[in-house]
Amino acid sequence: MLERVKHLVADEEGQGMAEYGLILALVAVVAAAALTPLGTGIKAKFNEVVTKLGGTPAP
């Protein structure tokens, strides 16, 4: 009986780690999706400032 309980606890810990991994992956995907347009906007503003100062915009 004790071995069966130990096995059950071990399985639940593995499940918990898998769930944390899925949550972390979801957060990474959402962060990448959110930061991509933000980076594009920042680059556009930077190029606007550089152009107004008479420089050459970044590629």
Image: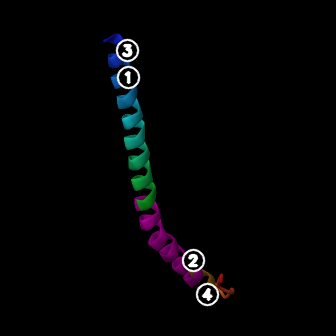
Q: Which callout, 3 or 2, points to the residue nearer the camera?
A: 3
Q: Is label 2 in a helix, a strand or a loop?
A: helix
Nearest to the observer: residue 48 or residue 2: 2
Real-space Cα separation, disc 1 to disc 2, in angstroms:
57 Å
- Residue that badge 3 annotates: 3
Name the residue rendered at 43%, 60% in the picture. Answer: 29
Residue type highlighted by circle 3: Glu
Residue type highlighted by circle 4: Thr
Question: x, y percentage for residue 19?
Answer: 37, 42
Q: Is residue 45 above or below residue 29?
A: below
| Quarter of the figure with the C terminus | bottom right
Name the residue rendered at 61%, 87% in the picture. Answer: 51
Q: Which callout, 3 or 4, points to the residue nearer the camera?
A: 3
Real-space Cα separation, disc 1 to disc 3, in angstroms:
6 Å
- Residue that badge 1 annotates: 7
Q: Earlier in the sequence, mark 3 or mark 2?
A: 3
Name the residue rendered at 46%, 70% in the picture. Answer: 38
Q: Is label 3 in a helix, a strand or a loop?
A: helix
Q: Mark 1 and 3 residues: CB-CB less than 8 Å, in contact?
A: yes
Span of residues in magenta: 30-48
- Residue that badge 4 annotates: 51
Real-space Cα separation, disc 4 to disc 2, in angstroms:
9 Å
Q: Is label 1 in a helix, a strand or a loop?
A: helix
* Mark number, residue 46: 2
Question: x, y percentage for residue 47?
Answer: 59, 82
Residue count near mark 3 (Cα–Cα under 10 Å), binned few <14, some 14–19, many ≥20 = few
